[in-house]
Image (spheres, rainbow, N blue to C red):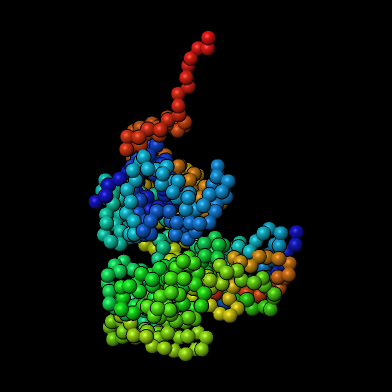
């Protein structure tokens, strides 16, 4: 079992360095939920189908992330608070090359 | 006043299946849902997506699951109040509850089962300073009466099916239709995208992409909106009578949060050792809306919770009766509509 370190800044601006497993088929949204870094019901509402933007985050480190799928791209086109470095956490698969990743959660809608 | 045995709030898979289990106990159900169609998230968010963990179905589309549930509960003639949100609950002297919707429809039942999922789906509103000032004064989040827009100037924002479909529809009704979307690409049925392209070429739809509405103007009534072209950063003012942002829906726990129920992590706490009852006797919470130690938000768990809730509701409604669970294979299914389904009887015949 191998873990990587990820720094996640929550919606209150507090940074958390957490261990994320690479062997459990997890995505970034699920890591945030497993550490309860955002209240239940405010993140991962659609369950990880790129059909809501509740897991939107800003990628702050310069890791090479997989390209956005059409679904993710379209969802981000309709989301609020979108920046150039916005991604949907549910579409970022936790893998070894993401060690040291730094992200900040986008604000919750209303 | 709608009267029933179990009033179910939320017509998602859990709420629908509760109708079946209640029906086996000869209890009638009525469902309230804020969405205009039954099925909850399965119909609204992902009808075309497959689900793989419904027992007995190696694969089923969410929309198909809803169709099947509707078919399964048909004999029990559930009532529906759709497109209305349950707003208030009042306990009556006889122990029953009266639930009133945002449109004033009243429902009375001795048992209320909240199967509200993540809450009621509300339109996502764009982040604009004076938006609320113009709500009902030119800003609308859904189109209820298309005739309202006859010979008016309408601006629609959004990039999904509803933005495309309404732009196409209103092109023939309104005097002017402007469609604004943040991208050049639209995510909708190919057919709709092509139609909008065609209407744009004909000059019937004024398309602004990539663009975003950034400001609203008007004394009391909406008169003008500012659209920023996000490529060039240039602002254009568009004179409009109506601005209709169609950015989809997002769920909110909403008024249920103020019903005096114990809430934890945006969900309603229930007794999972027995019957999924809340801290208010007679009010139950089943499916994704509830929480208890070890809770999993799965449809199959909702089905189980609905089943146990009905047993408890039966005891509450008929405290003097003893009920013994019967398999449907043994007892069959007798609908309130007079239909009866039962296992075929074995044939007893001698062999010569």
B18 sits to left or right of A49: left
Q: Residue at x 52, y 86 (%)?
A: B231
Image coords of residue A93 (percent x, y): 66, 65
- Choose between B145 and B184: the one closer to the eye: B184
Image coords of residue A89 (percent x, y): 60, 68
- Is there any visible trace of residue B298 in the rendered image? no
Q: Residue at x 27, y 72 (%)?
A: B148
- Choose between B179 and B337: the one closer to the eye: B179
Image coords of residue B345 (percent x, y): 45, 23
- Is there any visible trace of residue A46 in the rendered image? yes
Q: Residue at x 30, y 62 (%)?
A: B102
Give residue B268's quadrant in the image. bottom left
- Choose between B87 and B96: the one closer to the eye: B87
Q: Is residue A18 above or below residue B328?
A: below
- The number of callouts visible is 0
Image coords of residue B340 (percent x, y): 37, 32
B105 sits to left or right of B232: left
Quick one: which residue is furthest to the left in this view? B1
Q: Is residue A18 above or below residue B42?
A: below
Quick one: which residue is furthest to the right in this view? A1
- Choose between B180 and B213: the one closer to the eye: B180
Give residue B200's quadrant in the image. bottom left
Q: Residue at x 57, y 69 (%)?
A: A70
Quadrant of the frame with the C terminus of chain A: bottom left
Quadrant of the frame with the N terminus of chain A: bottom right
């Amino acid at each position: 079992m191998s873990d990587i370190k990820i720094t996640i800044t929550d919606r209150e601006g507090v940074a958390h360095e957490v261990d994320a497993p690479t062997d459990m088929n997890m995505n970034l949204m699920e890591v945030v939920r497993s550490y309860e870094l955002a209240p239940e019901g405010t993140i991962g509402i659609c369950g990880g189908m790129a059909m809501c933007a509740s897991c939107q985050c800003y990628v702050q480190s310069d890791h090479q992330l997989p390209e956005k799928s059409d679904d993710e791209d379209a969802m981000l086109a309709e989301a609020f608070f979108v920046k150039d470095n916005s991604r949907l956490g549910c579409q970022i698969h936790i893998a070894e090359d993401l060690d040291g990743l730094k992200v900040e959660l986008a604000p919750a809608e209303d | 006043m709608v009267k029933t045995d179990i009033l179910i709030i939320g017509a998602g898979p859990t709420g629908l299946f509760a109708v079946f289990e209640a029906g086996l106990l000869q209890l009638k159900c009525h469902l309230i849902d804020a969405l205009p169609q039954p099925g909850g998230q399965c119909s609204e968010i992902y009808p075309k997506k497959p689900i793989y963990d419904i027992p007995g179905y190696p694969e089923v589309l969410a929309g198909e699951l809803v169709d099947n549930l509707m078919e399964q509960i048909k004999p029990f003639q559930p009532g529906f109040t759709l497109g209305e949100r349950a707003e208030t609950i009042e306990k009556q002297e006889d122990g029953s509850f009266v639930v009133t919707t945002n449109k004033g429809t009243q429902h009375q039942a001795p048992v209320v089962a909240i199967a509200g999922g993540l809450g009621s789906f509300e339109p996502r509103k764009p982040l604009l300073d004076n938006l609320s000032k113009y709500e009902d004064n030119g800003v609308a989040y859904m189109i209820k009466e298309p005739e309202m827009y006859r010979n008016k100037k309408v601006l629609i924002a959004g990039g999904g099916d509803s933005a495309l479909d309404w732009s196409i529809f209103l092109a023939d009704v309104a005097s002017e239709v402007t469609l604004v979307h943040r991208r050049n690409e639209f995510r909708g049925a190919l057919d709709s995208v092509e139609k909008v392209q065609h209407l744009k070429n004909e000059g019937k739809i004024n398309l602004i992409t990539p663009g975003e509405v950034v400001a609203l103007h008007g004394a009391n009534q909406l008169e003008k909106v500012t659209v920023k072209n996000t490529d060039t950063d240039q602002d254009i003012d568009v004179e409009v009578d109506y601005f209709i942002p169609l950015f989809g829906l997002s769920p909110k726990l909403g008024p249920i949060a103020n019903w005096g129920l114990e809430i934890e992590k945006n969900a309603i706490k229930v007794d999972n050792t027995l019957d999924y009852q809340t801290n208010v006797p007679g009010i139950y919470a089943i499916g994704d809306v509830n929480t208890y130690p070890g809770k999993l938000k799965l449809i199959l768990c909702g089905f189980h919770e609905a089943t146990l809730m009905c047993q408890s509701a039966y005891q509450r409604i008929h405290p003097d009766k003893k009920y013994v669970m019967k398999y449907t294979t043994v007892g069959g299914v007798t609908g309130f509509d007079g239909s009866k389904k039962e296992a075929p009887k074995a044939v007893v015949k001698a062999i010569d």
